[in-house]
Amino acid sequence: MADTKKKPGAKSGKAKKQAIKSSRQAKESKKEPTKPEEA
């Protein structure tokens, strides 16, 4: 998350996608603790 400030142009899209993926995975791991790092 720190390197997002370094190059916002190159990483903004990627960081956003990663954040969405992370939050989605967090929700999923809460629902299904069987596979927390899949999806």
Image (spheres, rainbow, N blue to C red):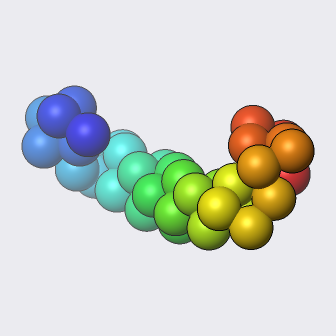
Q: Is residue 8 left or right of residue 32?
A: left
Q: Position of residue 24 (x, y in %)?
A: 62, 66
Q: Can I make out residue 24 in this image?
A: no
Q: Is residue 15 left or right of residue 4?
A: right
Residue at horizontal 34%, vertical 56%? 12
In the depicted structure, whether residue 8 falls above or below residue 30 = above
| Relative depth, front residue between 23 and 6 | 23
Q: Quadrant of the N terminus?
A: top left
| Total numbered labels | 0
In the depicted structure, whether residue 5 falls above or below residue 2 = below
Q: Position of residue 15 (x, y in %)?
A: 41, 51
Q: Is residue 2 left or right of residue 23?
A: left
Q: Can I make out residue 6 in this image?
A: yes
Q: Position of residue 27 (x, y in %)?
A: 62, 67
Residue at horizontal 81%, vertical 59%? 32
Residue at horizontal 75%, vertical 37%? 37
Q: Quadrant of residue 5?
A: top left
Q: Quadrant of residue 13?
A: bottom left
| Relative depth, front residue between 5 and 32 | 32
| Relative depth, front residue between 36 and 17 | 36
Residue at horizontal 36%, vertical 45%? 10
Q: Position of residue 9 (x, y in %)?
A: 28, 52
